[in-house]
Image (spheres, rainbow, N blue to C red):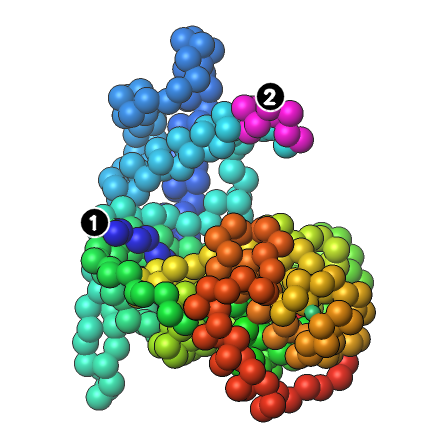
Amino acid sequence: MDSIRTYRFRIYPDTKRQKEIDEQIELARLLYNKLLEKAKNEYQKTKDFEVKKATFNRLLKEALAENKDFSRIYSQTRQNIFVRLQRAYQNFFRRVKERKGGKKVRVGFPRFKAKGRYNSVTYPQFGFEIERIRRNCRKVNILHVSKIGSMQVELHRKIRGIIKTLTIKKEAGRYYATFSIINEMETQNVENTFPVGIDMGLETFAALSDGRKIQKPNFARRAEKRLSHWQNVIARRQKGSERRQKAKLRFEREWQHVNNESNDFIQKTTTELVESGYTSFAFEDLRIQDMLKNHRFARSIGNAVWGRFMQVLSYKAEEAGMRVVKVDPRGTSQTCSECGFLNSLNLSERVFACWKCGYHNDRDVNAARNILNRATAGHAGSHARGDLTSTVQQVSQAESLKREHTLEISGGSSRL
Ligand SMILES: [Zn+2]
């Protein structure tokens, strides 16, 4: 099984290299627009929308003849512009189709990229290299990139697998390198003896069906404050003003900071989970959940972290040969995980107590057990009951009862 994953690292180009990157990005943007313009003209003549590779190469040749500067773009990067253009066309066609199918989507023809809307260059396969060197008694990693030069890269995670592409991106005045990696591996499926359900907690970050809880990272609350502060500042300042622009940059930096911190948290937690003896994971399918209910920033940080958490957990679990199941999250906090009876429970109630059978447990743990029930029942989204007697389930329920008394239940209901 091959899996593609991406690694993103901050890079530290010096002023000269920064200029080179900016210039490469700008040239790539201009070339993209040029080729789009040519492709549009081509359509006028041929009435054939499809941009074929041969056509593209011809248009590229023309563009290069018209503007010598384009030859300063690395050849592979120029080829990648074709990939981007093709993707823009494919998106367009897909949307046209979706709209014909009755879906309400906005359909726009591929557009020219304004300054700032095109902020990366991609090196497919070749044109870059990472070298580990000793500098001032410290080992550092240097990224060599064709047409740009060399710069330090902070590899905070070990890259495993074969590097397929490198994308250099400028974001909020900072530079990043993203590698996409193909992991060629053979995985053996693990026997599913200890599946676990995970619920996105209210008080805690996550609750597990065996009663375990993952505490909320501290940074989230702090970040929430700082983000809303800068958002207010942006709102106060005059549109188009330099001061507003500055506030925007600060906001983006804060956002990035949260991103980095949450990535560390996610990496640590997911590794720990995959290594703690569970054999499969079930969680809620967030696409089904109504995510638009609450527009508050705090919530969106939580959701963003949670979404990424599940993504990372999924690939780590699958890499280890474990199954990952997403289930319909509707009603998981209201349903009794023991007898399936639907209770009414308001947000402030931290303990789930069933009216019918008397089962009680922490609210989020009960939800996690429902998630597990739905996953082990085999149909995602069905209202599977807790009385299904698969051995797997009994194991985890026994485990859950064992840990139940160690639960710490606290009040309140604020979300991450
Ligand atoms: Zn019950």
Q: Residues within 10 Å of mark 1 (few under 14, many from 20)?
A: some
Q: Determine which of the numbered discs, if any, sits on residue 383 in the image.
A: none
- The quadrant holding residue 33 is top left
State the predominant SS element of the stretch in magenta.
Answer: helix
Q: Determine which of the numbered discs, if any, sits on residue 126 in the image.
A: 1
Q: Is mark 1 within 8 Å of ligand 1?
A: no
Q: Nearer the viewer, residue 123 or 180?
A: 180
Q: Residue shown at 42%/50% (left/top)?
A: 120
Query: What amino acid is labelled 1 in the image?
Result: Phe
- The quadrant holding residue 351 is bottom right
Q: CA distance from mark 1 to mark 2?
A: 41 Å
Which residue range is magenta in the image?
Answer: 95-104
Q: Position of residue 43 (x, y in %)?
A: 44, 14
Q: Position of residue 7 (x, y in %)?
A: 36, 62
Image height of 267 relative to 334, above or below: below
Q: Nearer the viewer, residue 223 or 54?
A: 223
Left or right for 12, reference 290: left
Ranked by sequence position, the earlier of labels 1 and 2 is 2
Disc 2: which residue: 100
Q: Residue shown at 62%/78% (left/top)?
A: 204
Query: What amino acid is labelled 2 in the image?
Result: Lys
Q: Nearer the viewer, residue 400 or 197?
A: 400
